Amino acid sequence: MIEAGFRAVGALARTSLVARSSIIQTRAIGPGPQDDYLNAAATIHTRLTPGDLLAGLLEIERSNGRARVRDERWGPRTLDLDLLLYGDLVLDEPGLTIPHPRLHERAFVLVPLAELIPDYLVPGLDQTVRTLLGRVE
C-alpha cells in the first residue's frame, strides 16, 4: 500500500516525487489491538497550493480504501498521508496546519524524515529535523 501511495503522490498534477525514505515498522498507537504501522516519508516538488496538495493526498487515501469519516482516530487504516512541511511555509487555517502540529513529537515521523532532510530547519520550530528526532528518541 505504501508503494501505491508513493506512486500516486508522484503522479499528482504538477508534482514529482524527488526522494523517498526507507519504510520503518513501529508499534501502533491508539486503542485496541492493531497491527504494527509502516511509516515512510517523501520529498516532492509541486506547483500545487498547500490546500490543493492536501486535497490530492486525501483523494489518494480514498482511492486506496480509506474512509476518514468511518475510521477512528489512531485506529487501523489502509493509508495515511500527511502534509508535514511545505518549504518554509508556516500556516494555521481550518483543516490544514503546516508544519504538521505533532511532527516534533513523533519519532515514527521524524525517523524517515531525518533520512531525507536531517539538516532541514523546521519553520516555526527553528530546529533541524535531526535535533527534533534527538529530543524524542
Image (cartoon, helix red, strand yellow):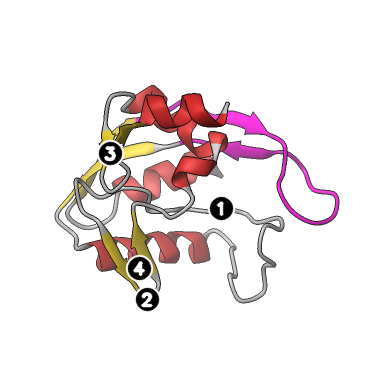
Judging by the rendered image, the residue that carries numbered circle 2 is 94
Residue shown at 20% from the left, 53% from the top: 89
Judging by the rendered image, the residue that carries numbered circle 1 is 79
Judging by the rendered image, the residue that carries numbered circle 3 is 126
Q: Does residue 96 appear left or right of residue 37 in this picture?
A: left
Task: Find the distance from the CA under tag 3 to the CA under tag 1.
Answer: 30 Å
Task: Find the distance from the CA under tag 2 to the CA under tag 3.
Answer: 23 Å
Residue shown at 36% from the left, 62% from the top: 97
Q: Quadrant of residue 117?
A: top left
Q: Disc 2 residue type?
A: Pro
> Is residue 70 visible from the viewing direction of this image?
yes
Q: Which of the two marks, 2 or 1, is nearer to us in this view?
A: 2
Q: Disc 1 residue type?
A: Leu
Judging by the rendered image, the residue that carries numbered circle 4 is 55
Quadrant location of the C terminus in the rendered image:
top right
Crowd class of label 2 (few under 14; some 14 to 19; many from 20; radius 10 Å): few
Name the N-terminal-most of marks 2 and 4.
4
Task: Find the distance from the CA under tag 3 to the CA under tag 4.
Answer: 27 Å
Name the N-terminal-most of marks 2 and 1.
1
Q: Quadrant of residue 75?
A: bottom right
> Residue 23 magenta-drawn?
yes
Q: Which of the two marks, 3 or 1, is nearer to us in this view?
A: 3
Q: Magenta stretch: dominant SS? A: loop
Name the N-terminal-most of marks 2 and 3.
2
Task: Find the distance from the CA under tag 2 to the CA under tag 1.
Answer: 22 Å
On the image, the x and y values in percent for residue 37 come to: 66, 40
SS for callout 2: loop
Name the N-terminal-most of marks 3 and 1.
1
